[in-house]
């Protein structure tokens, strides 16, 4: 079946209104609403990404509802699997605006094809070690959790908000990420949502590349 064009839709609407003129006010109201939605859609595409996140969170706290549009994903969110609130709702992202990647403790390991098993951790975490990251100690004794202990160690250089900075740095160990950051084709941002206090923090790190020095 062929997709109906804009002209076909207008022609069909005109034919209906010519037969039922009493629907004129209803049609005008719906057209006005559609115009506003399309203007908002166009504005969202051109708005600054950081400002979009800020305004999205304010909108979430003020209205607590989500509009429904299907857009091409513009953001990639790395979030924890057991989040209390959906990140797309927190930031007021519409369906299709963000590609969401969830894993245990929202950790990004250094580039390695075999060392860190996110799938294994995702299976072991809910069965044997809920709250594994929050209960880990600096010099904790070895346990029977094969995947979890290794996985959460990625975040031991720092906790809470600093753990996000560790992941931002680890993202640069992925060649395809670093290449685009250096060429200003990709921007990295850190974020932390406190679901108890209802606060949201967003920041960026100053990534710089410098020449290598040799010492002998």
Image (cartoon, rainbow, N blue to C red):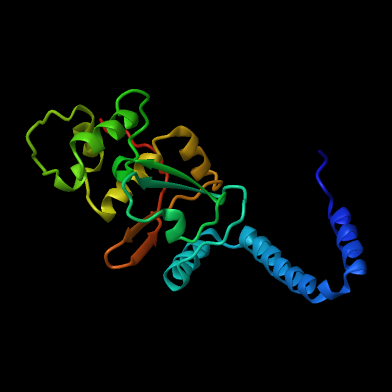
Q: In this view, does 157 lie to the left or right of 94?
A: left
Q: In the rendering, at what x and y percent does residue 169 appear?
A: 35, 44
Q: In this view, does 155 lie to the left or right of 38?
A: left
Q: How many numbered discs, if any?
A: 0
Name the residue at 24% across, 32% down: 124
Image quadrant holding the C terminus, namely top left
Depth check: give the residue in front, 127 or 36. 127
Name the residue at 39% across, 59% down: 203
Depth check: give the residue in front, 52 or 72. 72
Q: Is residue 183 placed above or below 206 in the rendered structure?
A: above
Q: Residue 12 lies in what quarter of the image?
A: bottom right
Q: In the rendering, at what x and y percent does residue 24 appear?
A: 83, 74
Q: Residue 47 lies in what quarter of the image?
A: bottom right
Name the residue furthest top: 114
Depth check: give the residue in front, 157 or 123. 123
Name the residue at 33% across, 23% down: 114
Image quadrant holding the N terminus, namely top right
Q: Is residue 112 placed above or below 163 in the rendered structure?
A: above
Q: In the rendering, at what x and y percent does residue 146 appear?
A: 19, 27
Q: In the rendering, at what x and y percent does residue 145 appear?
A: 17, 30
Depth check: give the residue in front, 207 or 111. 111
């Amino acid at each position: 079946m062929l997709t109906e064009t804009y002209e076909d839709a207008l022609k069909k609407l005109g034919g209906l209104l010519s037969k039922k003129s009493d629907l004129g006010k209803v049609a005008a109201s719906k057209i006005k609403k559609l115009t506003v939605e399309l203007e908002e859609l166009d504005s969202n595409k051109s708005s600054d990404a950081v400002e979009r996140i800020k305004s999205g969170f304010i909108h979430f706290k003020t209205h607590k509802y989500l509009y429904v549009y299907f857009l091409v994903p513009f953001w990639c969110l790395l979030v924890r699997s057991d989040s209390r609130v959906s990140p797309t709702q927190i930031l007021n992202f519409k369906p299709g605006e963000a590609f969401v990647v969830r894993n245990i403790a929202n950790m990004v390991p250094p580039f390695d094809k075999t060392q860190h098993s996110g799938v294994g951790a995702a299976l072991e975490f809910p069965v044997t070690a809920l709250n594994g990251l929050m209960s880990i100690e600096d010099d904790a004794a070895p346990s029977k959790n094969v995947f979890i202990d290794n996985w959460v160690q990625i975040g031991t250089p720092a906790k809470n908000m600093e753990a996000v900075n560790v992941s931002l740095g680890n993202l640069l160990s992925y060649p395809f990420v670093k290449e685009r950051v250096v060429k200003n084709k990709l921007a990295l941002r850190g974020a932390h949502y406190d679901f108890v206090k209802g606060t949201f923090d967003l920041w960026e790190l100053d990534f710089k590349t410098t020449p290598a020095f040799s010492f002998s």
